[in-house]
Amino acid sequence: MPPRHPSIRTALILAIAAGTCAPAAGAGAAQHPRSPDIRGVATTIVVTPAAHGRGQDLRTPDARDAASPTQDLRSPDTRDLSQRLAARPASRPVRVIRVTPDGFDWADAAIGAGATLGALLLAAGAATGMSRRRMQPPPITNA
């Protein structure tokens, strides 16, 4: 008679499946899929405490180079130019001439007035072009 509870039935099925699929305790050492040489190297790498102390970098060499902060990402021409400019002595100081304003500038006023007049003419032309003209109805003739 099968058990009445589904959880007991499930546990029983799992126990039977685990018992049939699990290898024997002594068979694991004799039937290892790796050769003895590789198995010894693998245990040496995993067990060695020196690898854990310094931290093992598992990145590829290209990834390590890309992550290094000292990598110069400029093109060779740019590097050469910057080295030539660094070797060049400093340029001469620039002489600054101060001009003090002496009042109203009529040239600036004329430019502002011309721009305002142009804007007004443009707005008037746009308003004229967009407005609808009323059409006179044709005269009624008695024929």
Image: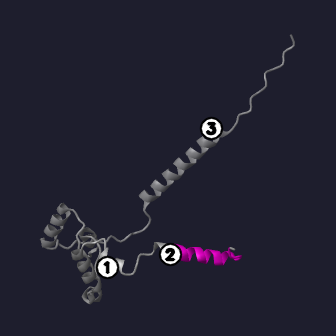
Q: Residue at x 39, y 81 (%)?
A: 25
Secondary-structure class at tag 2: helix
Q: Amino acid at mark 3?
A: Gly
Q: Main secondary structure of the magenta part?
A: helix
Task: Give coordinates of residue 66: x percent, y percent.
Answer: 27, 70
- 10 Å neighbourhood of mark 1: few (<14), some, or many (≥20)? few
Q: Is residue 81 above or below residue 58?
A: above
The residue under label 2 is 18
Most extreme residue toward the front is: 1
In 3D space, how far apart are the residues under numbered discs 1 and 3 (Cα atoms)? 98 Å
In which quadrant is the N terminus drawn? bottom right
Residue 8 among magenta residues: yes
The residue under label 3 is 129
Side (left or right) of 87 relative to 65: left
Secondary-structure class at tag 3: helix
Q: Earlier in the sequence, mark 2 or mark 1?
A: 2
* Magenta segment boundaries in residue numbering: 2-18
Task: Give coordinates of residue 108: x percent, y percent.
Answer: 44, 59
In 3D space, how far apart are the residues under numbered discs 2 and 3 (Cα atoms)? 91 Å
Q: Amino acid at mark 2?
A: Ala
Task: Give coordinates of residue 85: x percent, y percent.
Answer: 16, 68
Q: Nearer the viewer, mark 1 or mark 3?
A: 1
Most extreme residue toward the right is: 142
Residue placed most toward the observer, 60 or 92: 60
